Image: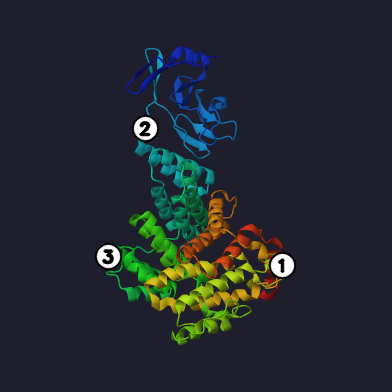
Amino acid sequence: MPEPTTTASMNGWTNIIALEELQGRGKTVIKNSGKQILLICSADKIYACNNRCPHEGFPLAEGTLSSATGDDHGKECILTCNWHSWRFDLENNETIVGGDALRMYPCEVRDGDVWLDLADPPQDEVRNKALEGLRQAFDDHDYERIAREMARFQRAGGNPLDALADAFEWAMDGLEFGTTHALAAAPDWLSLRARLEGDVEQMIPVVEIIGHLSWDCLMQKGPFAYAQMAADKFDAALFEQAIEDENESKAIAQALAGLAQGGGEALRLSLQRAALAHYQAFGHSVIYLDKTYELLGQLGGAAEKALLLPLVRALCSTAREDLIPEFKAYGPALAAWDGAGTAIPEVDSFRNQGVAAALQLVSASSANTDLLYDALMQAAADAMLHYDARYRSYVDKPVQQNVDWLDFTHALTHLNAARKICAEQPQLWANALLQTGCFLGRNANFVDWQQDVKAWQVKDADNFLDQVLSSMLDHGEPLYIFPAHTLKLATALKEELALNPGATWKDTALAALNRFVNEPVKRKHMRRAVTQANKFVELEG
């Protein structure tokens, strides 16, 4: 049956088809300016909607019409897409089953003809509707819908970074322990995005960030509200003490006062000191702080509250490993630091050294932080390159030996973040370098120095790093945590080598990254989890 053709247009309204013809057909599809519009005549009502299902674009003309529940007049206004059973209430313009909204077109009957208003709605209306849909997709962790709503938002002239700022605000109350890897990876995703061209390539990093945030919130099942009472004025000493005391409400009050008085910059130095005050969160505190401020620079001041309050919460709630027996040597080593040690450690001197011995090596080199920094980068890369991958397969080890690749990446990304902090506050070098010693001493138990690692050497550093970063755009990994660490490590090494192209640790670090991205990662430990659970329960008594 031939498609009807439009015959007249007036003020955005178009004469589409004679009413009698539509009634005879029941439904028909018309094409106009690239649009496919489905017209349906049901009882005495005419509906016009996009013929493409907003889910995956299948033709709704092939769908099924049915009556709404409780409708005794035979009016069929429920349209079901027969591909995936999404259902739309055409009468009330609601999506009953599914997610995305179906576009409806206003229609009128004039002098026996059906007229449609084919004018596109204002761009701001489309953007607002896309943001509403994005929020729903965020709450459901519907990754594909996140992508569709972002495409609608961007097509309507929206700035993806504005949508991203909104997503961090949505996530703010959803994170029980504050900042997560979703934020830590975000500035690196955006740095990668800045190098890309094309709508698809530039949208991938934004969708990945929002998806990761969404997942973290979904897993934590909030909301976890923040105290909203600000202090009368910001006091850096009180702010830092509140964090040290793990008093979140008092720390948040100070943070709000600081933001009101001077924005994020008012808090930055205090947060740097708090992040390095302890060997804590296995290096996350320092990384999170560095990435939060980098992200603020990319998103602007409007995101300050949504990014900084979770960081304060994270610092108040984080685990402080220097308080446990394994790292008890850290406190005395920090107290004894005198900045006078001149014995720069040899390349392999950290091999087979536990925490206390590693801290002694660091302290003995305290006079020259630049050379010590390079030595620690070499030692951290060396340990990672020689990680004993058998620990991924062991099922009968105690839980404290559940060590994998990510434990080794942290030593390097921690140093990268700490370097930037210590450039502003050099008095924190002792904290940063000794904390790296804690990493090295702990990880030394999980390496195999005898394995042959020559095959992982990288010949062209720049090309290799670019390939790793490009692979992030279609990494295919369902668990966000793994690509987040790959991205962070590759970005950190790229940053460090840009500052020091001839670094002594360059070849070792690149080989470690090469092995990390090419050896398989075990993502789920079923037998280990159950074995350890049974042993643990046996000891509960």
Q: Image quarter for residue 13?
A: top left
Q: Residues within 10 Å of mark 1 (few under 14, many from 20)?
A: some
The front one of 33 and 190 is 190
| Quadrant in the picture for residue 522 | bottom right
Q: Looking at the image, can residue 278 be seen? A: no
Q: Mark 2 highlights which residue? A: 121
Query: Which quadrant of the figure contains the N terminus?
Result: top right
Q: Which residue is mark 1?
A: 395
Residue 120: x and y in percent read 38, 30
User: Local crowd at mark 2 within 10 Å, few (<14), some, or many (≥20)?
Assistant: few
Do callouts 2 and 1 mark residues in contact (Cβ within 8 Å)?
no
Rendered position, 306 above or below 158: below
Tell me what residue is drawn at x 42 percent, y 55 percent: 168
Residue 296 placement, left or right of 532: left
* Mark 1 secondary-structure assignment: loop
- Mark nearer the N terminus (2 vs 1): 2
Say which amino acid is labelled 2.
Pro
Q: Is residue 532 above or below residue 81?
A: below
Quick check: 262 left or right of 120? Answer: left
| Residue under the image location 37 percent in, 64 percent down | 227
Q: For marks 3 and 2, give the CA distance.
A: 41 Å
Query: x, y percentage for residue 497?
Result: 49, 64
Check the picture and name the quadrant holding the C terminus: bottom right
What type is the residue that disc 1 sits on?
Answer: Val
Residue located 33% across and 73% down the image: 236
